[in-house]
Image (cartoon, helix red, strand yellow):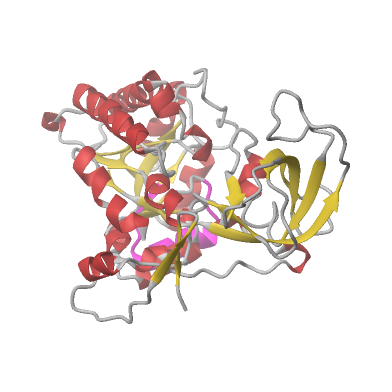
Amino acid sequence: MDWVTLGDRPDERLCQARNTYKVKLVPGHTLPTTEVLRAKAEEMSEQKEIDLVLAMGVAPSRIVFANPCKQNSFIHFANSKGVEIMTFDNEVELQKIQEAFPRSRLLLRILPKSGFKHHREIGNKYGCHLEDVPHLLLKAQQLQLNVIGICILDNASTSAVVWLEPEALLSRNHNGSKSLRHGKRARFSFHLLDIGGGFLGCSGEEEHFERTAEVVNEALQKYFPPERNIRLIAEPGTYFVASAFTLAVNVIGKRLESRDTPDQQNSMVESCHNTFRYFLNDGVFGSFLMFALLRTIKPTVEPLYAHTNPKKYKCSLWGPTCAGIDLILDQVDLPEMKVGDYLCVRNMGYYTISLYCGFNGMPLPEVFPYCAEDIWLRVFPEKKHPIAQAVSVNGLKLLQA
């Protein structure tokens, strides 16, 4: 349960902002049932996610319906449940909301400035440009809708931007500040700003979060000092859950491509002509879909058990489906594996299970929660639970039967 320990750090480092969790990261699989994330589960995009969080006991007033393009039935559902805060980024959405839920409280979703070196373009679907803000606020005013603040667009592909290029985050908050001024001129009482995400959370990236927190606090102090009386929300969801899941995948098949001369530059790694093709019981139609969509991010794969033979080969890893595009990784250095061996993939806690589609009959991976006794007692001091003994395999803690 890494997220129990990690859950406190954003509150300590980002003390000016309330830190929230997007349910779509890992919906309904272990995480939201803890008190730590129950206090933060506020961002959701669909009706089922709202149902899940309401069932956890989260007050409707704390929920942000963060999809700027909603089905009419979902808007009516939010109305029936008292979920009043929702986002929009265009005129048609305003008209839909006015007809279905006129007493809602709205956040205008804007695009951050693009063009930074490490920023992947994400503005082809949601978010309005800064120059469109005055027009949309005027339209909301004409429809007698209540716009209470700004939501700044982000997604998983921006997560590396913040610490690589701090000016990207500063620009994001500067745009938010300008939009709030537009709201004041339109005579809206803006009091809420969602600064979005972009917080790394993989194992070994703790220093990146510290760096990000410094930049965030600098931007908040510069553009949103306490005297402005703006409630700030941050979304470090990836930080909470990225390292919380480790995937164990089984080698179900193997094919030798060729076995010629070794690479002279690295005697420990056979040349690219000497390859093994491994077939695994999970693939791009399952836990690895995000990596297929965002080719700039690659999973780190290693044998679950240490190998005595140090020789490695250039290998390719394939999923179990009949699809020819079910390629997980190519040209990855691994020792020779046997059918039945396991590979370990760390930092699989975000956009993995939630993207699983089950194509070709591939089953959903089973989740085995592991919690150290001291952390369990910290979260549930009054609840006793049978504590299993744990063993460590290649740095990976496993419950002992």
User: Can I make out residue 148 in this image?
Assistant: yes
The segment highlighted magenta reads 69-86
**Which residue sits at x=36%, y=69%?**
33
334 lies left or right of 93: right
In the foreground, 48 or 363? 363
74 in the magenta segment: yes
242 in the magenta segment: no
In the foreground, 225 or 228? 225
What number of labels is visible? 0
Write down the quadrant of residue 334 in the picture: top right
In the foreground, 161 or 57? 161
Relative to 132, is 42 above or below?
below
**Which residue sits at x=50%, y=44%?**
93
**Which residue sits at x=31%, y=63%?**
38
Q: Position of residue 41 (x, y in %)?
A: 35, 57
Q: Position of residue 121 (x, y in %)?
A: 57, 27
Relative to 34, is 12 above or below?
above
Quarter of the image with the N terminus in it = bottom left
85 lies left or right of 125: left
Q: Position of residue 48 (x, y in %)?
A: 49, 66
User: Can I make out residue 353 in this image?
Assistant: no
